[in-house]
């Protein structure tokens, strides 16, 4: 939206100067996320922030598939100075500011493609910038890390509110007060009961970022941006009823779909009732023949986390609390990780993919969630 502001909107704006622009006169952002973390809304808010509160022209749009939790989402934002119209709406290939809402995306998709030495990265992670540079194999750039999940829990806000605060801090030219007015005028009017929590999440994200700049070196090569394309298409799709799409095969790895939580298994509490297996959509639980209380039974041996998207339905249905929710970052080595017993192949290369539409609700949560945060 190239904003031709009304007088009312002009009174709200604090004219800012963009630190640098590309050959089209634009400062560009790309937000990489999965469905459920609020990147789409965050992109829309950034667009409105620029057009209404910063005295800029702004464009914001998103790219996503089936609008389900866990599926890949990209949001694009462009700013330009008044008088310089934004005349294109193609995806952002060489971002000035790149935002990763989910750390696991780094190994699943080429999310850092197009990042050069002048790019700023904002990452939702508890790791350090140096750790993330190595994990991303980043050629160069200025990395800002913020543990948005934990800060969202602390503030009873949402991950996107914390990430918005971190984006404002990393960009350097956006006044925090302008972002606060934006939240008050938009989400505050729609969800007044959550305004205080959302403002707290925004402020925590702004204050808690840790940053480090990395100059280009020979350690990692620059990766140019290329549009992600499916391996299968109309010209080479196999005939005869074979379904080659992600989410349809036993080699699927759903770890990039998780939003920070996983089910933790407490074997000593398990009564092997099988409710977890019956409610799980993704072949996670591994039952084998055994003996329980002196009688033959199918015994729960553990979970294959390659197939777990973190929906936590098993936690909700477990009658003995043998399955509880835990933060994935706190359990890198899972002693209850058991390989899927039905897979015959020994050397499967798990393919990262998004969720397969089995989970669309949040019925397992104790609190009620809406777009603006927790209620």
Image: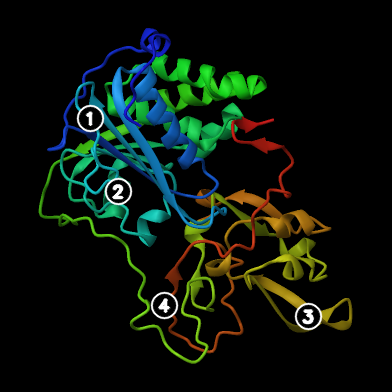
Which secondary structure, mark 1?
Answer: loop
- Residue name at image x 79 percent, y 67 percent: 275
Q: CA distance from mark 4 to mark 3?
A: 28 Å
Marks 3 and 1, how far apart in space?
A: 66 Å
Q: Nearer the viewer, mark 2 or mark 3?
A: 2
Percent across and percent down for residue 135 are: 31, 54
Question: Disc 2 to disc 4, how far (Cα)?
Answer: 30 Å
The answer to which image quadrant residue 280 occupies is bottom right
SS label for mark 4: loop
Residue 272 in view of the camera: yes
- Secondary structure of residue under mark 2: loop
User: Real-space Cα distance between discs 1 and 4?
Assistant: 47 Å
**Mark 3 element type:** strand
Q: Which residue is mark 1?
A: 85
In the displayed structure, 242 sits above or below 130; it is below
Residue at numbered disc 3: 298
Q: Are marks 4 and 3 in contact (CB under 8 Å)?
A: no
Q: Position of residue 127 (x, y in %)?
A: 39, 44
Q: Nearer the viewer, mark 1 or mark 4?
A: 1
Lateral position of residue 115 relative to residue 372, left or right: left
Callouts 1 and 4 close, C-beta under 8 Å: no
Side of 202 relative to 174 (left or right): right
Residue that appears at 33% across and 67% down: 229
Seen from the viewer's position, the closer of residues 1 and 195 is 1
- Reading the chain from its start, which is encountered first: label 2 or label 3? 2
Q: Which residue is mark 2?
A: 91
Q: In the rendered image, which residue does mark 4 sit on?
A: 349
Q: Position of residue 80 (x, y in %)?
A: 23, 28
Quarter holding the C terminus? top right
Q: Earlier in the sequence, mark 1 or mark 4?
A: 1
Return the residue nearer the eye: 69 or 208: 69
């Amino acid at each position: 939206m190239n904003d031709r502001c009304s007088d009312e909107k002009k009174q709200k704006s604090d004219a800012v100067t963009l630190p640098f622009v590309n050959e089209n006169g634009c400062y560009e952002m790309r937000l990489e996320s999965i469905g459920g973390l609020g990147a789409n809304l965050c992109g829309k808010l950034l667009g409105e922030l620029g057009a209404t509160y910063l005295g800029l022209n702004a464009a914001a749009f998103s790219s996503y598939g089936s609008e389900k939790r866990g599926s890949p989402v990209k949001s694009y934002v462009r700013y330009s100075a008044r008088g310089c119209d934004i005349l294109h709406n193609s995806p952002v290939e060489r971002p000035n500011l790149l935002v990763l809402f989910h750390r696991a995306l780094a190994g699943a998709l080429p999310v850092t493609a197009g990042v050069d030495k002048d790019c700023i990265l904002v990452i939702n992670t508890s790791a350090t910038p140096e750790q993330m540079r190595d994990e991303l194999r980043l050629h160069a750039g200025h990395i800002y890390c913020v543990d948005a999940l934990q800060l969202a829990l602390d503030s009873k806000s949402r991950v996107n509110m914390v990430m918005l605060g971190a984006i404002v801090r990393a960009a350097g030219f956006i006044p925090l007060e302008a972002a606060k007015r934006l939240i008050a005028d938009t989400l505050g009017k729609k969800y007044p009961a959550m305004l205080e929590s959302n403002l707290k999440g925004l402020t925590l994200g702004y204050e808690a970022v840790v940053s480090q700049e990395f100059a280009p070196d020979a350690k990692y090569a620059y990766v140019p941006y290329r549009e992600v394309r499916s391996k299968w298409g109309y010209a080479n799709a196999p005939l005869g009823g074979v379904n080659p799409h992600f989410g349809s095969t036993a080699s699927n790895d759903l770890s990039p779909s998780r939003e920070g939580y996983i089910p933790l298994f407490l074997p000593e509490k398990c009564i092997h009732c099988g409710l977890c297996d019956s409610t799980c959509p993704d072949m996670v639980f591994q039952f084998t023949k055994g003996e329980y209380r002196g009688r033959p039974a199918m015994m729960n041996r553990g979970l294959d986390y390659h197939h777990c998207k973190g929906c936590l339905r098993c936690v909700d249905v477990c009658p003995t609390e043998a399955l509880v929710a835990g933060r994935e970052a706190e359990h890198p080595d899972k002693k209850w990780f058991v390989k899927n017993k039905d897979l015959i192949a020994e050397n499967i290369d798990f393919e990262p993919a998004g969720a397969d539409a089995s989970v669309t609700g949040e019925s397992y949560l104790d609190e009620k969630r809406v777009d603006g945060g927790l209620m």
